[in-house]
Image: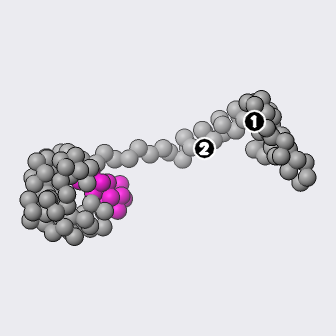
Amino acid sequence: MDKSLYLMATGMLLRKRREAARLTLADLSNRSGVTIAHLSRIENGLTDVRLSTLQRVIDAMGANLSDLVVAPTATVSARTVLERRAAGRVRVERAGLGPSDPDARLDRKERAGVDVSVERAAVAST
């Protein structure tokens, strides 16, 4: 995981945990001894927090370090993306629609009960 994403995710989890404990930044600052400004930078993912500082903050909230574990993000391989794109293209072609078939789109809207007369006039004039 990219370091900046990790910092943002950790900060987000800290903020959620603090808000769930109904603590303000000032409350947490008083309990942990960490300045409000530093807590804000941590929660916004702007600073790489030291483990000792993180532990003080977590203790002050009555939480455990395991509560802040950030799961790695799921990724999809490029091959999977290309296979899904090709499958989607096949479904579109089977439906008789093309990527730039405005008449088919307007027909679907019309079947759904939408007035498309203005759009049809615009398509006809181009």
Residue 114 badge: 1
| Image quarter of residue 80 | top right
At x 35% / y 54%, what residue is drawn?
1
Q: Is residue 87 above or below residue 2?
A: above
Q: Is residue 54 above or below residue 116?
A: below
Q: Counting residues from the N terminus, which is met first, the one under dot 2 or under dot 1?
A: 2
Q: Give the CA distance from mark 2 to mark 1.
A: 34 Å
| Image quarter of residue 88 | top right
Q: Disc count in the image?
A: 2
Amino acid type shown at disc 1: Val
At x 14% / y 59%, what residue is drawn?
28
Q: Is residue 17 left or right of residue 88?
A: left
> Which residue is the site of mark 2?
82
Residue 70 badge: none
Q: Position of residue 56 (x, y in %)?
A: 10, 58
Span colored in magenta = 1-14
Q: For the residue carrying disc 2, how many other residues have a C-alpha within 10 Å: few (<14), some (14-19), or many (20+)?
A: few
Q: Position of residue 25 (x, y in %)?
A: 19, 61
Q: Position of residue 90 (x, y in %)?
A: 71, 34
Q: Nearer the viewer, mark 2 or mark 1?
A: 1
Q: Is residue 4 magenta?
A: yes
Q: Is residue 68 above or below residue 84?
A: below
Q: Position of residue 44 (x, y in %)?
A: 31, 62
Amino acid type shown at disc 2: Leu
Q: Secondary structure at mark 2?
A: helix
Q: Is residue 66 left or right of residue 109?
A: left
Q: Is residue 41 among the parts visible in the rendering? A: yes
